[in-house]
Amino acid sequence: MARKDDILKSFLTHELLETKYELKKEERPSTVREALNSDIPIVKAVALIVEGLEKSPTATDNELRNSVLQFLNTAI
């Protein structure tokens, strides 16, 4: 498993995602690639963050936030 997939897994298994977003274990993708294709907006948003960190380790928080907000604005 790639490092970014491990990072994704650690986010998606967080208690807050399980309770607030009712993300069930069987809905959790195991790779960033799968998560980017998810129909669940919060899963895809987390995948965008992880992918952004991997592609551009020097990306600022603001750049990542803008990327995620842009996605969420179109997805919701």
Image (cartoon, grey):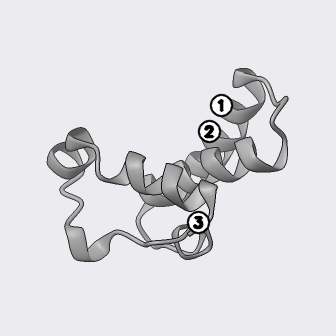
Q: Which label's residue is closer to the chain start, 1 or 3?
A: 3
Q: Amino acid at mark 1?
A: Arg
* Callout 2: SS: helix
Q: Amino acid at mark 2?
A: Leu
Q: CA distance from mark 2 to mark 1?
A: 6 Å
Q: CA distance from mark 1 to mark 3?
A: 18 Å
**Label placed on residue 44:** none
- In the picture, residue 26 is in which quadrant? bottom left
Mark in front: 1 vs 3: 3
CB atoms of marks 2 and 1 within 8 Å: yes
> Can you give x and y, in whole percent of width and height, for residue 40 in the image?
41, 65
Name the residue beneath numbered marker 3: 32
Query: Within 10 angstroms of label 1, few (less than 14), some, or many (20 or more) residues?
Result: some
Q: Is residue 52 visible?
A: yes
> Can you give x and y, in whole percent of width and height, for residue 72 in the image?
55, 48
Residue 74 located left or right of residue 10 = right
Image point (27%, 47%), residue name:
17
- Residue 16 vertical placement versus 35 (above, below): above
Residue 9 located left or right of residue 68 = left
* Callout 3: SS: helix
Q: CA distance from mark 3 to mark 2?
A: 18 Å
Q: Amino acid at mark 3?
A: Val
Q: Is residue 76 visible?
A: no
- In the picture, residue 9 is in which quadrant? bottom left
Name the residue beneath numbered marker 1: 65
Q: Which label's residue is closer to the chain start, 3 or 2?
A: 3
- Residue 60 vertical placement versus 23 (above, below): above
Name the residue beneath numbered marker 2: 69
Query: Within 10 angstroms of label 2, few (less than 14), some, or many (20 or more) residues?
Result: few
